[in-house]
Image: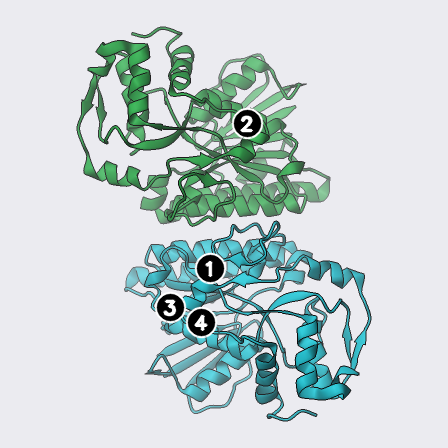
Chain colours: A cyan, B green
Amino acid sequence: MHILIIGAAGMVGRKLTDRLIADGALGGRAITALTLADVVAPANPGTSLPVKCVAADLSAPGAAASLLAGRPDVIFHLAAIVSGEAEADFEKGYAINLDGTRLLLEAIRREGLAEPYCPRLVFTSSIAVFGEPLPAAIPDDHIHTPLTSYGAQKAICELLLADYSRRGFVDGIGIRLPTIVVRPGKPNKAASGFFSGIIREPLAGLEAVLPVDDGVCHWFASPRAAIGFLLHAANLDTTPLGQRRTLTMPGLSATIAEEIAALRRFGGEKALRLIRREPDPIIARIVAGWPQNFDASRATELGFRAETSFDAIVEAHIEDELGGRVH
Amino acid sequence: MHILIIGAAGMVGRKLTDRLIADGALGGRAITALTLADVVAPANPGTSLPVKCVAADLSAPGAAASLLAGRPDVIFHLAAIVSGEAEADFEKGYAINLDGTRLLLEAIRREGLAEPYCPRLVFTSSIAVFGEPLPAAIPDDHIHTPLTSYGAQKAICELLLADYSRRGFVDGIGIRLPTIVVRPGKPNKAASGFFSGIIREPLAGLEAVLPVDDGVCHWFASPRAAIGFLLHAANLDTTPLGQRRTLTMPGLSATIAEEIAALRRFGGEKALRLIRREPDPIIARIVAGWPQNFDASRATELGFRAETSFDAIVEAHIEDELGGRVH
């Protein structure tokens, strides 16, 4: 089985790569080739599997077609310009997030014109497809009225994925990921960064800034759960999806207070003292517009699983990133 | 005021042109220039207004920019490949219905980069954005799960229209038209053709074929109502639309039996005898998948008006197409 990961150098892409190499198989079939693509060629992960690391700009003419030269059986398409950048650079956001995905779908369709070809395509969409007014728990069939260009681009790609799948050009499935916590690595400038920071930094003995109230509520899953979603999507029978090819993934709706309670259980009072409360009205306003809870029963019925407590999310972080030990 | 109509050679485009010329004004402002564009240059309607008739393929590079050279204040974008053709010719459907609209939006945005420009753009979308499962009366905020490539293309254009409007590049409004009856002209091959045919042909003393049961129900408005929608959309304050820039237009949910009752009132028994019942299981199956009723209260609250009885639809046909007289 040949697997292609587009956007392999990102956090999720690297974890997915590591997991596929560790498993050596996907859905019971041995992996015989792995192509890792990103704007900058991903580092070779070092494995006995035949791995090809490729630099590719999906929005450039011919890039998608050359990625498909080996006719991968499963394609993970994780590449995207993030929300803030897509809002700041209108043309770049549409070029990568819309044209890039459409060129990939077109390259798959054209690859199948000469000889039948219908790979499984797993596409990461976003809960940014939803916009105000929002119900308390957003159902999977809620209308898409995105409030950002990034959300619009993801919503458009969901429609393309569904139409190309309906026409039999690709076997597509889209998954809308929750906010991923605890992200490993250094603090970044994303408005959502503190959700990870207030766990990751104190557990490493470092100070973290909390810019919002304890009552703020959001929608979470661990990196480990995200990799589980991707693998499950790659193996799922897509027949029951019908024309609704994209699913909101399950997650945990939790408050900052619940995050802090979980931190206390694993890191004790000394970890709590490392959270510095520094209210930031700009971040508070951004976060206030984000959805807090979803009804992901459609995905749950199809076997997708996420953590059901913040303790489990922190535990996954300690096991996967800290070698099972807290500082 | 300069008005541009793209798709001016179609039935709705011609009626809109005639109405604008008759009015000489739009929203209280005198029309000073009228540009009529279509794949084949529309016939000059003959008026004292300065009219330019242009052949333009919106999907060709530069075509949209040259249409905008005169910086029209209001643009009606009616051009589209119809549902059946977009399904039969995948590439052509995406080229015209998606790329054509996106190139128009991009040309408007780029026109505004040098000097501020934010025209009103009235875009005709379609109830084909909705797909199964459908509620009894489809609300304006029902999720888009199109079952055709045409519907996917229209749904994507709605998202683009909303995002370009949100960013301030255009002042866009989309309207989803009901099935237009009674269409003037000759019978055509559209699966929906009989809805018009069983009124138009008998009133002209000609036979018409009815391929479905009397109980079949569908969603209608007259050509006159459609022109009313377009003019109202061109004049509407778009502020209350928020991020939901496209509205399902009001219409009449009526059965074939109600159509026939209206025909009897205007054409008598001799008209009824001209309806030949010839059940066609293929057409019956296609029509069975179509929506039957909508909750268009959002558009109604904003002042859009359609007929509320089939009698009114037949009356509009007799007045507008038959000079007020039945054969």
> What is the spatial separation of the Cα atoms under label 4 and label 1, in whole angstroms?
29 Å
> What is the spatial separation of the Cα atoms under label 1 and label 2, in whole angstroms?
39 Å
Contact between marks 1 and 2 (CB within 8 A): the answer is: no
Residue type at the position of mark 4: Phe
Q: Which of marks 1 and 3 is in front?
A: 3
Q: Nearer the viewer, residue B68 or B14?
A: B14
Percent position of residue B222, x then y:
42, 22
The tag on residue A103 is: 1
Contact between marks 3 and 4 (CB within 8 A): the answer is: no
Query: Which secondary structure, mark 4?
Result: loop
Residue at 48 percent across and 19 percent down: it is B44
Mark 3 / mark 4, whichever is N-terminal: 3
The image quarter in which residue A255 lies:
bottom right
Do the residues marked 1 and 3 share a common chain? yes
Disc 2 is attached to a residue of which chain? B
Query: Which secondary structure, mark 3?
Result: strand
Do the residues marked 2 and 4 share a common chain? no
Q: How crowded is mark 2: few (under 14 residues within 10 Å), some or many (20 or more)?
A: many
Do the residues marked 3 and 2 share a common chain? no
Query: Which secondary structure, mark 2?
Result: loop
Q: Nearer the viewer, mark 4 or mark 1?
A: 4
Quadrant (top left/top right/bottom left/bottom right) for the N terminus of chain B: top right
Can you identify the residue that label 4 sits on?
A304
Percent position of residue A148, x then y:
63, 54
Q: Which of B144 and B293 is in front in this view?
A: B293
User: In the rendered view, does B161 fall on the left or right side of A296?
Assistant: right
Q: Which of marks 1 and 2 is in front?
A: 2
Q: Is residue B295 above or below residue B131?
A: above
> What is the spatial separation of the Cα atoms under label 1 and label 3, in whole angstroms?
16 Å
Can you identify the residue that label 2 sits on?
B304
Mark 1 / mark 3, whichever is N-terminal: 1
